[in-house]
Amino acid sequence: ATPTAIMVGTGMGAKRGVLFKNAMALETSARIQVVVMDKTGTLTKGEPEITDVITDGMSQDELLRLVAAVERESEHPLAEAVVRHADALGVAAARAERFENVPGHGAIAQVDGRRVVVGNRRLLERENVDLGTLAARRDELAATGRTAVLVSVDGVAAAVIGIADAPRDTSVAAVAALHDLGVEVVMLTGDNQATAARIAAQLGIDTVIAEVLPGDKAAKIAELQRDGRKVAMVGDGVNDAPALAQADLGIAIGAGTDVAIETADVVLMRSDPLDVPIALRIGRGTLRKMR
Ligand code: ADP
Ligand code: MG
């Protein structure tokens, strides 16, 4: 590797806010065959908004009062969206007790002596909650690409909350540019299969790995590497860090968490997915000059 080629490549990246942490990162960029992208905060803006609150047997205000009490104790981006929504509607506050975070699933607490469970389908299944008529509403939301957060109160299904997180403006173009480079694009997410599949279809992504628990993301990367393929992972969250480390090339979104930025080999300062194909192209250009 000629030091001059490395310097030129690093400089070209820096000008665009694509920071290669070392020469190895630049060289690996040239060899990437698969790019795995986290959904929330990477392909999407990571600004979830409540779009629907569908209750069963309870007023919306009472439901939001219970749910917001639980979500106030959680640091999950979806929880923050629920709390903001309740506050904006002026919903009365309530205290949550015995809060329990269930990573990759949701949260549970006691509110007014009632057991309130907020999370995905697997969490409510674990609680043996029958969704009843809410199951169909949940499927409708997922089919439109929304995340459906389910709520049960004392073991009875109480609501489905629809949450939308818009794709970033350049996600479609980024996926197309990666395909032009002959790279396979995979979406990796903890969100449910139907929601993820809908968003992937909108973005032109053909492979979706959904409902992945936070601790399992790195293992999914290892699976993709099994036949010797060079895999890059693009992510923003704390729970993406192990996958960024496992990948041949870890790429962090600049607006992401410190842990992701520290773990990655490349940082996209502008948080623009289009900078992923650009990073690979800079790598390829550098490698050509080194031969
Ligand atoms: P991701 O951020 O990729 O969606 P997570 O592993 O953090 O993945 O969460 C997986 C799913 O679990 C979420 O899509 C959501 O349905 C549910 N979930 C997790 N935490 C919460 C929470 N605090 N409130 C509501 N739902 C949650
Ligand atoms: Mg994310």
Image (tube, helix red, strand yellow):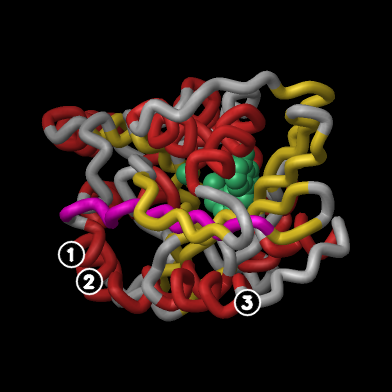
| Neighbour tally class for label 3: few under 14, some 14-19, many 20 plus, Cα within 10 Å | few
Per the image, the residue denoted by label 3 is: 133
126 vs 165, left or right, is: right
Q: Secondary structure at mark 3?
A: loop
Q: Nearer the viewer, residue 156 or 193?
A: 156
| Res. 176 mark | 2
Q: Amino acid at mark 2?
A: Ala
Residue highlighted by disc 1: 173
Q: Nearer the viewer, mark 3 or mark 2?
A: 3
Dot placed on the residue nearer the N-terminal end, 3 or 1: 3
Q: Quadrant of residue 174?
A: bottom left
Look at the image and tell me in which quarter the N terminus lies: top left
3 and 1 marks in contact (CB < 8 Å): no
Measuring from the top left, give residue 90's x and y in whole percent: 38, 26
C-alpha distance separating marks 2 and 1 = 5 Å
Q: Please, what secondary structure does the residue beneath circle 2 have?
A: helix
Q: How many marks?
A: 3
For the magenta stretch, what is the residue range? 158-169
